[in-house]
Amino acid sequence: MNFTFNHFNFNVANLEKSLEFYDKALGLKEVRRINAKDDSFIIVYLGDGTGNFSLELTWLKDREEPYDLGECEYHLALVTDDYDAAYKKHKEMGCICYENPNMGIYFIEDLDGYWLEILPSKK
């Protein structure tokens, strides 16, 4: 029996702003969408165009309060082939929330408080 990664979910308060953030910050594009028949939720899957793994953004119509993310002791990590350009872009966007220069990594925070680790590609 084998298992492969399929997707990871983040619940978001504003779907359109989140889609804009993920496109601008990471180049992730919508690959699939599910609209509830009763309009109670929308699920959008984002992909990087290279693999089958996707980030699922779930928007719930009746949700008004921000999500409680606990202590953010989890994260999704992405590798970039141009670390310096990515860092500059994220610095300009104002979304870098934590840096660890000794490890050569940093984290960005999305509009709902989720952390995403940015790693340089291994050479």
Image: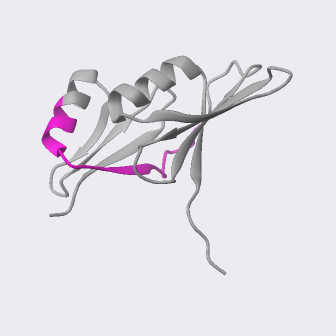
- Asked whether 104 falls inside the magenta stretch, the response is no
Which residue corresponds to the image point at 56% horizontal and 61% vertical from the top-left? 5
Placement of 6 over or under 62, stated as above or below: below
Which image quarter: residue 64? top right
- Outermost residue toward the bottom? 1
According to the image, what is the colour scheme of the structure? Answer: one colour
Q: Is residue 110 left or right of residue 60?
A: left
How many marks on residues? 0
Q: Is residue 31 left or right of residue 75?
A: right
Placement of 82 over or under 104, stated as above or below: above
Which region shows up in magenta?
Answer: 68-88
In which quadrant is the N terminus drawn? bottom right
Which residue corresponds to the image point at 39% horizontal and 51% vertical from the top-left? 77
Residue 23: percent from the left, percent from the top? 40, 28
Placement of 20 over or under 46, stated as above or below: above
Which residue corresponds to the image point at 45% horizontal and 49% vertical from the top-left? 75
Which image quarter: residue 121? bottom left
The residue closer to the viewer here, 107 or 9, is 9
The residue closer to the viewer here, 73 or 95, is 95
Residue 67: percent from the left, percent from the top? 62, 31
Residue 3: percent from the left, percent from the top? 61, 71
Residue 110: percent from the left, percent from the top? 44, 31
